[in-house]
Amino acid sequence: MTLKVAVTGASGRMGRFLIEAVQAVEGVELGAAIVRPGSSLLGADSGEMCGLGRNGLVLSSELDPSSFDVLIDFTSPEATLANVHFCAEHGKGIVIGTTGFTAEQKAYLDAAAEKTPLCIASNFSTGVNLVFSLLEIAAQVMGDEADIEIVEAHHRHKVDAPSGTALSMGEAIADTLGRDLEKVAVYGREGQTGARDRDTIGFATVRGGDVVGEHTAMFLCDGERVEVTHKASSRMAFARGAVRAAQWLHGRAPGKYSMRDVLEI
């Protein structure tokens, strides 16, 4: 049975990779490609837009529940919440790669997961989700003796900081150590900050150029340090993971799932 997938934000950088990834997977079909109302690309062929040749599916600004089984959404928090509401109303699964949600918005997602299956991840690449597991091991072994810092770099167009992936790395470490990330996170330093508190987890952000995504967690001890790094060279790593998540999510019971659930790690 063919799985029909809809992609929102289809004309954006990530949307184009998602369309390419969907079309590359056997048994998965692009059911809809959604762009914002008023876009100059409305009515254009989605395959041709991505440089893949015509596929006969034109860009639309409205979701039709008959056109897809699972929606993939890498847009903005506000747009994602509207799409989650639509999917919950029509019993459709949704894969969410959007980051930057507020606490209130996260609560809304939790409530929606009682009606329909959601797969939410700050990063859908296989490598990053492996890194989360490695960080838990490193925290178990070194966390109480190490100063922990997380550095991330992204392209100039990224609008949230630190990245969702960096925060997820911090959460994986903090949870392992029994710490509350909201209480121990330090976001940048300036001026006379005083000696470092061992229990804190520091975050540093770099923005510039066309960096797809780089993340490093450092466990710094006296005399040695361990660094766990992931570097993405193409958004296709995220797109393939999202399509894999859509395949896994289809037919699941309502609930809030993660990419680690998909990968069983």
Image: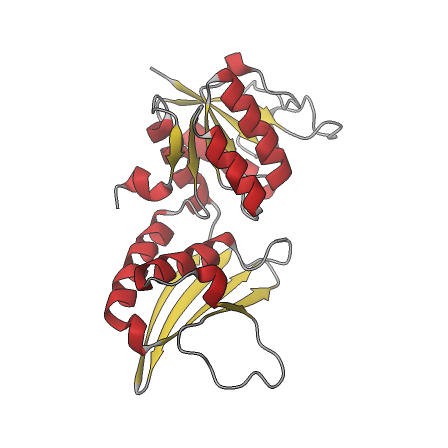
Q: Position of residue 39 (x, y in %)?
A: 73, 30
Q: With 27 as the anchor, is 161 left or right in this view?
A: right
Q: Is residue 9 visible?
A: no
Q: With 47 as the anchor, is 22 left or right in this view?
A: left
Q: How many marks?
A: 0
Q: Is residue 264 visible?
A: yes
Q: How is the image coloured?
A: secondary structure
**Which residue is depicted at the point 25% across and 62% down?**
137
Q: Quadrant of residue 117?
A: top left
Q: With 183 as the anchor, is 132 left or right in this view?
A: left
**Which residue is depicted at the point 49% across and 41% down?**
97
**Which residue is depicted at the point 60% across and 86% down?**
192
Q: Quadrant of residue 113?
A: top left
Seen from the viewer's position, the closer of residues 128 and 26 is 128
Up-down: is 187 above or below 245? below
Seen from the viewer's position, the closer of residues 28 and 253 is 253
**Which residue is depicted at the point 50% across and 52% down?**
164
Q: Position of residue 70 (x, y in %)?
A: 45, 24
Q: Position of residue 108 (x, y in %)?
A: 54, 35
What is the quadrant of the N terminus in the image? top left
Up-down: is 235 above or below 62? below
Seen from the viewer's position, the closer of residues 70 and 137 is 137
Seen from the viewer's position, the closer of residues 184 and 80 is 184
Q: Position of residue 225 (x, y in %)?
A: 32, 78
Residue farthest to the top, as pictured: 66
